[in-house]
Amino acid sequence: MLDYLLNALITLFVTIDPIGLAPIFVGLTRGMSRGQRRQTAIRATVTATIILYTFALIGEGLLTFLGISLAAFRISGGLLLFWIAFEMVFERRDQRKLANAQKAIEEERVHELADIHHLAVFPLAIPLIAGPGAISATILIAASAPSTLGLIGLLVIIGALVGACLAVFLLAGPLDRMLGTTGRIVLTRLLGVLLSALAVQFVADGVTEIARAAMRAG
């Protein structure tokens, strides 16, 4: 159980990347008042929590309904997580996130009459917090829960990590200045290497499961 929860914590921490979202949030909410920033942060984290909880609880059932085996999803999810790790190590993920954030800011400036808080849903909640990597990891980890208690522990971890995102959003300015450019680069690369190892493990587990199923069928 401890290994399961530790693996869940590390995987989701790396894929959600609360600290890395600080400069994105600063850019997206530039020009907002403190109250508007707080409201945007709360709405984004609540939305992301609902999304991740939903996939944790019904993700495996959804795969079954669609006729997708868990082994196949482990392989595809592992490859997706590996790509995210690759982007983190070679500093491409932050560039992509910043590009998406800048696009959203520019669109908001064009549509001045639009509700500014829609930024809480896109791109903050989706795909920056509850992105494809986090959703894939959530489904995979939930599917391998050893018991109901393990699944409850996963939900607690998700809530804690999204809560960390909320704390980071509320302290985004000071935190970004404290880490600095060098600190963000070092942290991102270290987490990327760790995520790549976890992604390879997901793929290996999926291949092994498919191989065993083929041997049983043969």
Image (cartoon, rainbow, N blue to C red):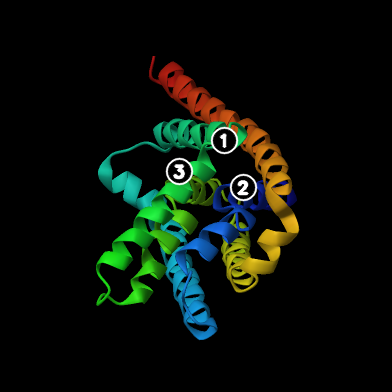
Q: Which residue shows up at 51% across the image and 73% down it?
A: 41
Q: Disc 3 marks which residue? A: 96
Callout 1: SS: helix
Q: Which amino acid, mark 2?
A: Val
Earlier-in-chain disc, 2 versus 1 = 2
Measured as percent of width and height from the top left, residue 29 is found at 47, 69
Q: Which residue shows up at 67% across the image and 42% down it?
A: 185
Measured as percent of width and height from the top left, residue 179 is found at 73, 55
Q: Disc 1 marks which residue? A: 85
Determine contact: label 2, label 1, CB under 8 Å: yes
Q: CA distance from mark 2 to mark 1?
A: 9 Å
Q: Disc 2 marks which residue? A: 14
Callout 2: SS: helix
76 or 100: which is nearer to us? 100
Measured as percent of width and height from the top left, residue 206 is found at 49, 29
> In this picture, is 199 found above or below 116?
above
> In this picture, is 82 found above or below 42?
above
